[in-house]
Image (spheres, grey):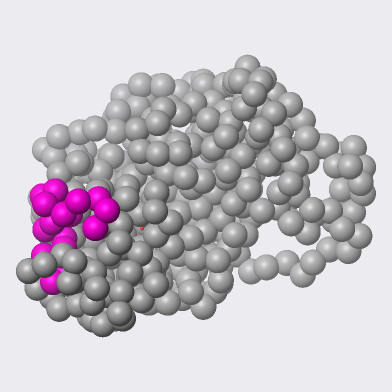
Amino acid sequence: MNTQEIIEKKRDGLAMSQAEIEFIVQGISNGSIPDYQIAAWAMAVYFQGMNERETGELAWAMAYSGEVMDLSAIEGIKVDKHSTGGVGDKTTLVVIPLVAAAGIPAAKMSGRGLSHTGGTIDKFESIPGFQTEKTYKDFIEQVNRIKAAVIAQSGHLVPADKRLYAIRDVTATVESIALIASSIMSKKIASGAQGIVLDVKVGSGAFMKNLAEAEKLARAMVAIGRAAGREVIAVLTDMNQPLGKMVGNALEVKEAIDTLKGEGPSDLTEISLNLAAHMLILGKKYTSFTDAWHGAHEILLSGRALVKFKELVQEQGGSLDYTLVNYGLPQADIKERVCAQQAGYITRLDALEIGRAAMVLGAGRRKIGDSIDYAVGIELFKKLGDRVEAGDCLAVIHANDTEALHNGRNLLQNSFKIADLPLPSKELIIKVI
Ligand code: URA
């Protein structure tokens, strides 16, 4: 088989055969296809798309490009969640302990943040001492003992996605429905859970900027998961503004703990309860959504989810002081307020720009392997629709470097728009598929 002919075929809008897809995935994993041909192929897919069969076959071939986890040694129905990527999205830190506290095993493998979107592993690693690497045996044993574990995805899992994603990230080919769906679902299939809840983000801070595209992505992922014999629910949620009020690793851990104490922002609490309820249904704890939501709510209010979070942190070597306001998480040296220049209503709070501002401060990485500063980020004091007076504090920047502070401040200031009249509020949970 010839890579150039396969690129040509896709460039001209023709569907690839299963053998051609497997050939490309094999060449990505074993290094026999060079970066420039992979980039050309990804760009052809970006413009021409893939049909449902091709997308499913790509996901499947990628899932089996490396190790596939066998979670059968974990008792019960294993459930997982995955977000397509957003800004301030710390739901995993709330949802995993919540579901585990209900007795449903949550064996989670997560990724690191890239570009303007955050990653769960970076957030957990901002907890002093927290270990995200575990042997397979220890991972299974921990889930059986406390029902929860969150570890970094092993390099042996889905190697094809690792290389393809790094190339897509620098060739403007991330925002392709076929490539995102196969990337995410290959990892979900390889990580072994029987039930998967997908949080598909829609809006400026998401890869899918509009509802129609996000819905196509959600349907593509659900179809791949079901064809692989998994139960899958996709929840479309708003990502035009950051979720919650904190953006940046340690700041987001603090907000997640506040939420587990019942003192979190309403949007984060609402999405977390919704996702947890769907996971409890997939875990066969409840049959109706209303019962599952009330069950999740009761666990949150009772403090059992917080107890489970503490257990998870301790189990993985983390050390926090829950008597302190910031729980002993790393703190930035510089804290600077950004104030409103005029009175009015917040009509824009662009998630993408805030994500970029956090990245410039050092909270995210431009490319795989960059180091990050766990302490820095942005604390929002106002959200979309809020009334402000001139001089009111809109946000506080947490920084450790004056040049980064300067650049981050400019981006942050541009992300806010204040107008005389408020805009109608957008729904947070848009649709369930
Ligand atoms: N998250 C992934 O894991 N893959 C993508 O392609 C996009 C978001």
Residue 207 among those drawn in magenta: no
Residue 191 appears left or right of 365: left
Q: Position of residue 117 (x, y in %)?
A: 49, 47
**Residue 141 can be seen, yes or no:** no
Left or right: where 284 falls relative to 271:
left
In the picture, the quarter occupied by the C terminus is: bottom left
- Residue 265 appears at what percent x and percent y? 63, 48
Residue closest to the eye, 304 or 92:
92
Residue 31 within the segment the image draws in magenta:
yes
Q: Would residue 233 appear left or right of 8 to someone viewing this image?
A: right
Residue 101, position as x, y percentages in the image: 36, 47
Q: Nearer the viewer, residue 219 or 167?
A: 167
Does 206 appear above or below 404? Answer: below
Residue 413: image quadrant is: top right
Give ligand 1's quarter of the image: bottom left
Q: Which residues are magenta?
A: 20-37
Q: As displayed, is residue 90 above or below residue 285?
A: above
Q: Is residue 342 above or below residue 296?
A: above
